[in-house]
Image (tube, rainbow, N blue to C red):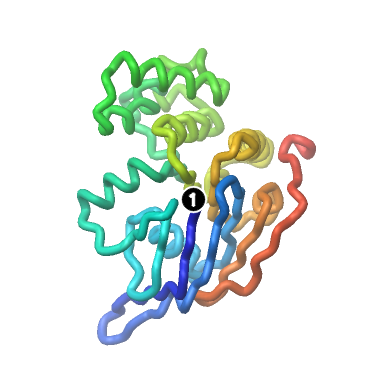
Amino acid sequence: MIEIKDLHKSYKMGKNSLHVLKGINFNVEEGELVAIMGSSGSGKSTLLNILGMLDEADQGSYTLDGVPIKNLNEKLAAQYRNKFLGFIFQSFNLINYKSALDNVALPLFYQGMKRAERMERSMAYLKKVGLADWATHKPNELSGGQKQRVAIARALASDPKVLLADELTGALDSKTSYEIMDLIQKINDEGRTILIVTHEKDIAQMTKRIVNLKDGVIIDDRKITQVRAMQDV
């Protein structure tokens, strides 16, 4: 599903250059649930940006579902993101003046789906995350956990190959975090490939594999026995 080979990324810092990724080799099979961990400056956010086609490597290759991801202009990158990826963010990134249903439907609007079809699909995904009764509510009428469920439904609505989650529980309390991870585990159980960037060890333990980055290199990559999230709630 994802193949990363000898990935390097540097950023110009005045007259100097900061080498952030230093030869990353990293594969993800379809249906995996992977946590990417590392302290600030480890390169995990840069790696996520490259995986999300928000940035491009200086050297190496990135292949997603058999498609080489390289030399993309903004239009093609946007098309590929729409086709392959769903994003979930710590800050939810919901539009405050739109209802939960309209927020979920937004990616489908940009795909050109007719209104009736996108509303039907969006409601189905709100139901999937347990928020059908909150479809007409705006984000300021929802709890943090509910907002993240809307964001998950939005990410799923376009049926992406891969979900990329950046600190998806970072703004939530422990109980709500475990509820969100329980939902993520169930989505993964259906065969969805999911990558989660997190600094929280307990959240990482609820995935199936943990990849640790330090100073731009992978120092540990191990499969784990998955902890079911709700057992600790």
- The answer to whether residue 22 is left or right of residue 105 is right
Q: Is residue 5 above or below residue 161?
A: below
- Residue at image x 56%, y 67%? 39
- Exactly how many numbered labels are in the figure? 1
Three-letter code, disc 1: Asp
Q: Position of residue 154 (x, y in %)?
A: 42, 32
- The answer to whether residue 35 is left or right of residue 114 is right
- Secondary structure under tag 1 reads strand
Q: Position of residue 21 (x, y in %)?
A: 45, 74
Q: Is residue 44 above or below residue 109?
A: below
- Residue at image x 51%, y 34%? 148
Tag 1: Cα neighbours inside 10 Å, few (<14), some, or many (≥20)?
A: many
- Residue at image x 28%, y 24%? 113
Pointer 1 residue: 166
Residue 90 visible in the current orientation? no
Seen as rendered, the residue at the extreme front is: 66
For the C terminus, the image quarter is top right
Q: Quadrant of residue 107?
A: top left
Q: Quadrant of residue 184?
A: top right
Q: Quadrant of residue 94?
A: top left
Q: Is residue 89 above or below residue 143?
A: below
Closest to the observer, 30 or 213: 30
- Residue at image x 65%, y 70%? 220
Q: Position of residue 88 (x, y in %)?
A: 46, 42
Closest to the observer, 194 or 4: 4
- The answer to whether residue 37 is left or right of residue 107 is right
Q: Position of residue 85 (x, y in %)?
A: 41, 45
Q: Is residue 138 above or below residue 164?
A: above
Residue 53 visible in the current orientation? yes
